[in-house]
Image (cartoon, helix red, strand yellow):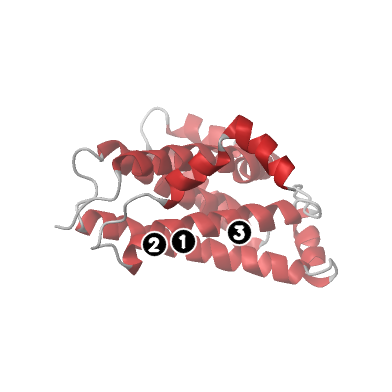
Amino acid sequence: MSKVYDWFEERLEIQAIADDITSKYVPPHVNIFYCLGGITLTCFLVQVATGFAMTFYYRPTVTEAFASVQYIMTEANFGWLIRSVHRWSASMMVLMMILHVFRVYLTGGFKKPRELTWVTGVILAVLTASFGVTGYSLPWDQIGYWAVKIVTGVPEAIPVIGSSLVELLRGSSSVGQSTLTRFYSLHTFVLPLLTAVFMLMHFSMIRKQGISGPL
């Protein structure tokens, strides 16, 4: 086993990477409230795992979506648990994100030289809210349908481009299959990819600049 490790160590310098990760200085003023961002990341990873599991059973069509969710909850092995954990971790992710934003703002973590870290954090907050909006519609029940209809109808109040934005969001002039397809694609591919990219940027900047000092 040691020969295998030595082979990888010689090429990748694993120990040097491990030492760099574990030897990073942590300021003495850091407390449990500085863990809120990490908890948000953990919730996101739970979302990815449980969401991926549900894609094996969920059918993104207006005629089968609700029935497929029922199947997940009543017949698929541990489906009820997977979907429940997905919903609970979604709520937890939103809550932790909000608390994290407040903590960073109140402790001045957005100030120079961490402005870009704050910007990527705000983008991540918007992406988190977008997860909630798109995921809410996927069961395609009465609540999900009317939520989508209301949310996608809001841009219509914008002068000149309002109607075009509504049609872009819905995929047509009315809420239907095109809308569900778009929301499903956003929820399962576009948003997770963007979130992963901005999280990588966010944590890389934190790693480079360190945690902000006390007020």
Residue 172 can be seen in this image: no
Decide which of 135, 176 is in the foreground and name it: 135
Residue denoted by label 2:
35
Does residue 160 appear left or right of residue 51 in this picture?
left
- CA neighbours of label 1 inside 10 A, class few (<14), some (14 to 19), many (20+): some
- CA neighbours of label 3 inside 10 A, class few (<14), some (14 to 19), many (20+): some
Does residue 16 appear left or right of residue 60 in this picture?
left
How many circles with numbers are drawn on the protein?
Answer: 3
Looking at the image, is mark 2 or mark 3 nearer the viewer?
A: 2
Q: Amino acid at mark 1?
A: Ile
Disc 2 and disc 3 in contact, CB within 8 angstroms: no
Q: Amino acid at mark 3?
A: Val
Residue 68 is labelled as none
> From mark 2 to mark 1, how far is it between C-alphas?
6 Å
In percent of width and height, residue 39 lies at: 46, 61
Q: Is residue 152 above or below residue 171?
A: below
Residue denoted by label 3:
46
Residue denoted by label 1:
39
In percent of width and height, residue 158 lies at: 37, 36
Q: Quadrant of residue 202?
A: top left
In percent of width and height, residue 70 lies at: 78, 66
For the point 79% across and 64% down, the residue is 72
For the point 49% across and 54% down, the residue is 41
Residue 211 can be seen in this image: yes
Q: Is residue 24 above or below residue 189?
A: below
Disc 2 and disc 1 in contact, CB within 8 angstroms: yes
Query: Image quadrant for the C terminus?
Result: bottom left
Q: Amino acid at mark 2?
A: Cys
Q: Quadrant of residue 185?
A: top right
Q: Quadrant of residue 188?
A: top right
Q: Sequence-wise, which precedes: disc 1 or disc 3? A: 1
Q: Sequence-wise, which precedes: disc 2 or disc 3? A: 2
